[in-house]
Amino acid sequence: MNRFNIIAFTHSSAGLEELAKFHLEQELVCAKMEELKQRLKLSEVMYLSTCNRTEFLMVSEEESNEANIGDFLAAFNSEWDQEQIENLSLKAKSWNGINAVNHLIEVASSLDSMVLGEREIITQVKDSFNFAFKHHLCSDMIRIVVRQTVETAKKIYTHTDISKKPVSVVSLAYQNLVSKVTDLESRVIVVGAGTTNTNMVDFLQSHGFKHFTIFNRSLENAQKLANKVNAEAYTLEDLKTYSKGFDILLTCTASSEHIIHKELYHTLLAGEEGKKYVVDLSIPNDFDPSLTTEYDVDHISVEFLKGISDANLQERRKELIKVRQIIYESIEEFKEIFKMRQMEIKMRSIPQKVKEIRTTAMEEVFSKDIAALDDNSKETLEKILNYMEKKYVSVPMIMAKEFVNQKKEEE
């Protein structure tokens, strides 16, 4: 288990400006992860990136202690000098072994999220794993860790009230917006095609909104979201010349500065007057808040939404004792799962060994004796050997499981 490490950078520990340094467009993820595997001698790696965190799940090829953050940073970006590496090292967090498993469960259960009980993160964990597994970046160890993580998070969301009262940024933004905008013909500009905006667009489309225009740094990702809602897709650069107007502006990017400044906002208005609605789910804001003093705009920001969620968060925090108990039980269960999995891996060679012994016995040791048998005797012998081979393959695993269960009961 010591081979499993997690290194993380979050909005709270590193700040969004530093966090942006670890953002990778999806088309670059595979190459960068393969580079990390080679330079750090990793057997598995998984990249998890959201609007407020970037985490690297790593499995080293050999038994090791906690991952060296300095070595990781140097491998991630060879252009960083020693001063930059030392500065970023102070803002990193790392976990090793079973503590890393515990951390990932807490992340997927939203205990480490900006908003307690925000369920979007469990989907992000699953999607990141599926991508890594599909592209052969990770395999068995990360697979069983993520499986236990997802199962535990689902159990927490099902058997506690930690997510019952709406406090997530997307849910509150959606509820707040639709309470103010009743015209389903409203034109929606979407800036950023990440998970947060995708979820928000899904909510709005389900509600009945249908006029979307998607802008994103990567045109390919903008097109993916646009295809879902029958919309047009553009790059962020195209915002500067967009002149079709809008009623609702939805934005969430990883930018460290305001994207929607006065000049750009004036362009987007295209000469239109009247109230506009801006939903800004970025930290820091994509939309310059000072514009609310110059224009008729209803600005729905993360800061505003967090104020709404405080009362519900107090109710959710009452569930933390139950959540912690579920996580504790899950970690204890995972320890046994991991032990059993290691036994299964070590016993993979048993079937082949049994076949080799059988072949040696029949073709070398007892070849003359077998040759002297009549056809019926040979057929009976073949049946006996087939039966014994199957039993010899299954018995060690059964005994191992019984041994593990017995030790667990004794403890």
Image: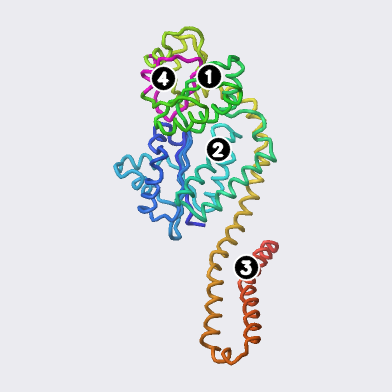
What residue appears at the point 29 percent right and 42 percent down from the top-left corner? 79
The extreme front residue here reads 375
- How far apart in space, not on screen, are marks 4 and 1 (Cα)? 14 Å
- How far apart in space, not on screen, are marks 3 and 4 (Cα)? 61 Å
- How far apart in space, not on screen, are marks 1 and 2 (Cα)? 22 Å
What residue appears at the point 61 percent right and 23 percent down from the top-left corner? 207
Main secondary-structure element of the magenta-colored stretch: loop
Residue 217, image quadrant: top left
Q: Tell me whether the residue at label 4 lies in contact with that at label 2, contact meaning CB atoms closer than 8 angstroms.
A: no
Disc 2 residue crowd, few under 14, some 14–19, many 20+, Cα 10 Å: many
Instruction: Specify the amino acid type for callout 2.
Output: Ile
**First-in-chain label (3 vs 1):** 1
Q: Does residue 238 appear to the left or right of 394 in the view shown?
A: left
Task: Point out the frontmost of discs 3 and 1.
Answer: 3
Write the start and end of the magenta stretch as one range: 238-262
**First-in-chain label (3 vs 4):** 4
